[in-house]
Image (tube, rainbow, N blue to C red):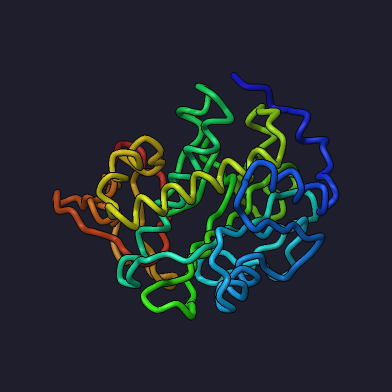
Amino acid sequence: MPSSHSALSDAVLAPPAEFAAGLRSALPGWNVSWLASTPSTNADLQQYLRRGGEGPALIGSHEQTSGRGRAGRPWHTRAGDALLFSCGWQAQIAPARLPPLSLVAGLAACEALSSLLGPHADGALALKWPNDVQWNTAKLAGILVESVPVPAPGRIGLVLGMGINLRGAGALSRALGREVADWALTGSAADPARLVSAVAQSWRAAADEYAVEGFGPFQARFARWDALYGQPVRVIDAGRTLFEGTARGVDASGKLQVEETTGQLRAVTVGDISVRAAPQGGWA
């Protein structure tokens, strides 16, 4: 088992200019900037693309003052406790084909992180549909994929943002009242710049592949990281339970498949997915 502590848990992120310089070396051809503080790296990249920036570009920050998660939820963390960054570029993808990109971004992030963790990542690193990265069932990172109109005809601006906890999982778990993980718990000594560059490269490659081939080739790759498969789930929308069943992976378009007690499969495209433990002795 990996150690519960790594040098990363005590590390202090390099100053923004130094951190950015290291990323530029790892990401040749990318427009890279790293800030001390910003309201939202996703919002910063949206502005860059709206102004005609083509990318690939990466904007990160030691701190976000108005970070956002799925459904616009506010997201806050102390400076230095998380890696906060967004990647963006122009792409030729029709708006109707954008939804599965959340899953693509999630599995690409898992593949990148796994490359830094080695064999012990299997079984511990997982992806909760559509794009929450987990470590031993606790949330390690969240991903937010957005799009923005750009001046170039026939193109769209893609923004993929990520916040990955570096340290402080214990305090954060107590504050939120739910289990949270951080990179220090993985036992990896990979430095933060390697995490960022690995995810950025994986995202770009996966998005380019998706633009050409769609989600089909990603379906089997998703199965490797699927945290929900075989788990009882409750499908919730706006706080209301729509139905319950057992998660059965995703289909060729990235929709979550939920098997009801009747054996019927229902596809889920919107709403929050809440995992609940099955009652003792199975489903009631």
Which quarter of the rendering shows the N terminus? top right
Q: Which residue shows up at 71% across the image and 49% down it?
A: 82
Q: Nearer the viewer, residue 223 or 35?
A: 35
Q: Nearer the viewer, residue 115 or 276?
A: 115
Residue 100 in the image: above or below residue 115: below
Q: Which residue shows up at 46% across the image and 29% down it?
A: 123
Residue 193 in the image: above or below residue 265: above
Q: Position of residue 257 (x, y in %)?
A: 25, 52
Q: Is residue 119 visible?
A: yes
Q: Which residue shows up at 49% across the image and 49% down it?
A: 203
Q: Which residue shows up at 58% across the image and 30% down it?
A: 116
Horizontal side of 176 relative to 92 (left or right) equals right
Horizontal side of 199 relative to 234 (left or right) equals right
Q: Position of residue 132 (x, y in %)?
A: 50, 51
Residue 59 in the image: above or below residue 116: below
Which image quadrant for residue 281?
top left
Q: Position of residue 197 (x, y in %)?
A: 62, 44
Q: Is residue 169 visible?
A: no
Q: Position of residue 28 (x, y in %)?
A: 62, 47
Residue furthest to the top in view is 1
Horizontal side of 70 relative to 18 (left or right) equals left
Q: Nearer the viewer, residue 207 or 238?
A: 207
Residue 146 in the image: above or below residue 139: below
Which image quadrant for residue 34?
bottom right
Horizontal side of 25 relative to 52 (left or right) equals right
Residue furthest to the front in view is 29
Q: Nearer the viewer, residue 111 or 89?
A: 89
